[in-house]
Image (cartoon, grey):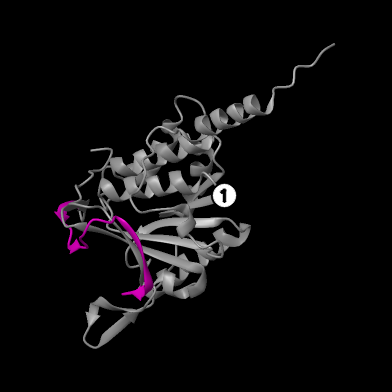
Amino acid sequence: MVMYVPDSQVQQTIIVEARSALNGVDGCSSVPGFSAGDIDPGAKYLLFGQYNGTTEFPQQFGNVICDLSRTRALTIALDWPTEYSQTFSNYISDAQPNADDALLALPVWDKGSTDGRSSAATLRLLQLLRRLRLAGRDIEVTAFIPSVPGDQNDFEAGIAGQLEAISAKGRLVVALMGSLHATKQEVPDPRNTLPPKMIDPAADRLPKDQVISIHFESKGGTAWGLGGPHKVPVFGGGQTLWSLYANTINGFDGRLFIGGQVTASAPYKQ
């Protein structure tokens, strides 16, 4: 019996084609200025602060995951109740064509949930994460919003505790959350200004040298939340979409600028 062994050039072609097939996932685009090498190997948490209910922020978050997951094992953490984690885990590994059914059965998609997390853009992000997993990327998806009695500081402490537990596996935790949770400094509580009460966000409760916190920015626009579309403040400008700062600014280590205005993404179920 004669065994055929490809020569080195053929072997290299096979490897390149295999990698191309692995990395060519539908829905992935590059983020101008971003490189996976920007993320320090010693970082345990990569946090993205956003306004919920936009089309563009979850889309660009997904593009960052596309790039990072080529070379790193990731745990994607989303700001949904922790009890949804198992559904997420099952969903991204389900190759059946009706996999969306179990996901869309979660109560967060109900018509009465209008805080932006139930948006069509969120569903597209989850569908992208599933395609990445089924294409062979080493990713997990979990949720980090705990059920915690108390005030905002108790809630932030609960989120930080969940993120620490998620990071115990040693994988890079890449989380999408509201901007407040991702801020690495105390901020005044807008509901209690006289006398001022300070909120210590989740990101500020984690080891500073292990956290890279990124602020999503845009030239304004609209988001879906508070029961309907509302205006988003203008943050950022210029040409570069992704950039890291030399030092933390306003509680963030860098930004991901959309390059224009954001548009509202309404709830998937209306």
| Residue found at the very far bottom of the displayed protein | 195
Residue 151 belongs to magenta span: no
Q: Which residue is mark 1?
A: 73
Q: Is residue 210 left or right of residue 100?
A: right
| Residue found at the very far right of the displayed protein | 1
Element assignment for label 1: loop
Q: Residue at x 20, y 56 (%)?
A: 226
Q: How many marks?
A: 1
Instruction: Locate residue 203, reporting x and y percent.
Output: 43, 70
Q: Residue at x 51, y 57 (%)?
A: 173
Work out whether residue 192 or residue 75 is closer to the camera in this orientation and state it.
75
Residue 242 belongs to magenta span: yes
**Which region is colored magenta?**
227-251
| Residue found at the very far top of the displayed protein | 1
Q: Is residue 3 above or below residue 157?
A: above
Q: Residue at x 32, y 45 (%)?
A: 59
Work out whether residue 95 or residue 195 is closer to the camera in this orientation and state it.
95
Q: Residue at x 46, y 72 (%)?
A: 157
Instruction: Locate residue 194, reporting x and y percent.
Output: 21, 86
Q: Quadrant of the N terminus?
A: top right
Q: Is residue 71 left or right of residue 159?
A: right
Q: Is residue 262 above or below residue 164?
A: above
Q: Quadrant of the C terminus?
A: top left
